[in-house]
Image (cartoon, rainbow, N blue to C red):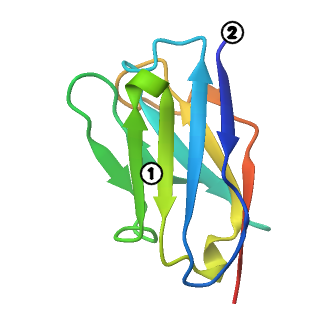
Amino acid sequence: QVQLVESGGDYVQAGGSLRLSCTASGTIFSANAMAWYRQGPGKQRELVAGTTGGRTTLTNYADSVKGRFTISRDNAKRTVYLQMNNLKPEDTAVYYCAAHRSTVALGDPDYWGQGTQVTVSS
């Protein structure tokens, strides 16, 4: 059974930083594409950042977070991170960690974490 456990969500002022963590169990991990999604109040869930699995790691970002957020992974710790800098009130959302069975993201993720709340005050 695959489990994804997020942590790091918090209340922060605009301009501040947070680092989210997601630790996986029950999966190969290094071979799995991983991603962070978010769902803000009254909004649909959206992809924030993704990283491929395998030997060569590629990343992609939503336009709204490029230059501010960084996704990274530590395969030895089975953990993927989302470093969020220069946070804005519009970044307020529940952030979800997601995993694909495949090395690259093909369609919707196969596994989801429970979510962690990030609130950014103006």
Residue under the point 34% across and 71% down: 67
Total marks shown come to 2
Callout 1 secondary element: strand
Residue 121 in the image: above or below residue 24: below
Taking depth in this image into account, of 72 and 103 the one nearest to the observer is 72
Residue under the point 49% across and 52% down: 82
**Residue type beneath disc 1:** Ala
Disc number placed over residue 1 in the picture, else none: 2
**Residue type beneath disc 2:** Gln
Where is the C terminus found, in terms of image quarters?
A: bottom right
Where is the N terminus found, in terms of image quarters?
A: top right
Q: Which quadrant of the structure image shows residue 50?
A: top left
The residue that disc 1 covers is 49
Residue 66 in the image: above or below residue 116: below
Residue 101 in the image: above or below residue 87: above
Label 2–label 1 contact, CB within 8 A: no
